[in-house]
Amino acid sequence: MCMKNKSEQAKKMFHEGYNCAQSVFCTFCEELNIDLETALKLSSSFGGGMGRLREVCGAVSAMFMIAGFKYGYTEPNNDDVKTEHYTRIQNLANEFRRKHKTIICRELLGLEKEPLSPIPDKRTEQYYQNRPCENFIADAAQIIDNYIKSN
């Protein structure tokens, strides 16, 4: 998986059937020094806006996981370090919001709040034509890649 363009690599993973979070997070395995299987398992719960709850977009959650893995804090009582990290996360969220107006999965997909099913939609050509997720995945991968390259 050594493609140059992170957005294209993330979109490719999505088309292979991985969820939004997995598609973004696993694109950065090399930078995170994490094996693919571990990365897939770690990010598996975040697809569909957290297990199809349609809350925070899985691609956005993956950006946050990547930022935490690379730049996160380990000192539980250091408010300065926490503030620095939370500022980083909010800046990443704001950059995604500038492009898409929200970081909430159901809002991105134009879905109403309704009873939720844990059953994933079948990945058909129609699914890919109707879902804008590929764009969100590509943008999230690009945002976090740009952030890593500039820090």
Image (cartoon, helix red, strand yellow):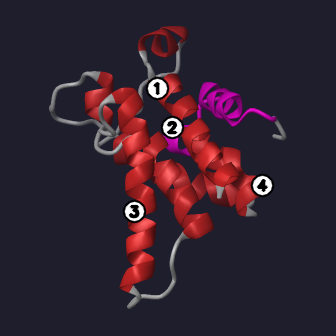
Q: SS for tag 1?
A: helix
* Residue 12 falls left or right of residue 147: right
- How far apart in space, not on screen, are marks 3 and 2 (Cα)? 24 Å
Marker disc for residue 30 = 4
Q: Is residue 36 visible?
A: no
The quarter of the rendered structure image containing the C terminus is bottom right
Mark 1 vs 3, N-terminal side: 3
Seen in the picture, residue 109 relative to 147 is either above or below; the reply is above
3 and 4 marks in contact (CB < 8 Å): no
Identify the residue position indicated by label 2 in the image: 20
- How far apart in space, not on screen, are marks 1 and 3 (Cα)? 26 Å
Marker disc for residue 133 = 1
Q: Position of residue 81 (x, y in %)?
A: 45, 79
Marker disc for residue 87 = 3
Q: Position of residue 42 (x, y in %)?
A: 55, 59
User: Which residues are the magenta region?
Assistant: 4-22
Give yes or no for residue 64 being in the magenta stretch: no
- How far apart in space, not on screen, are marks 4 and 1 (Cα)? 24 Å
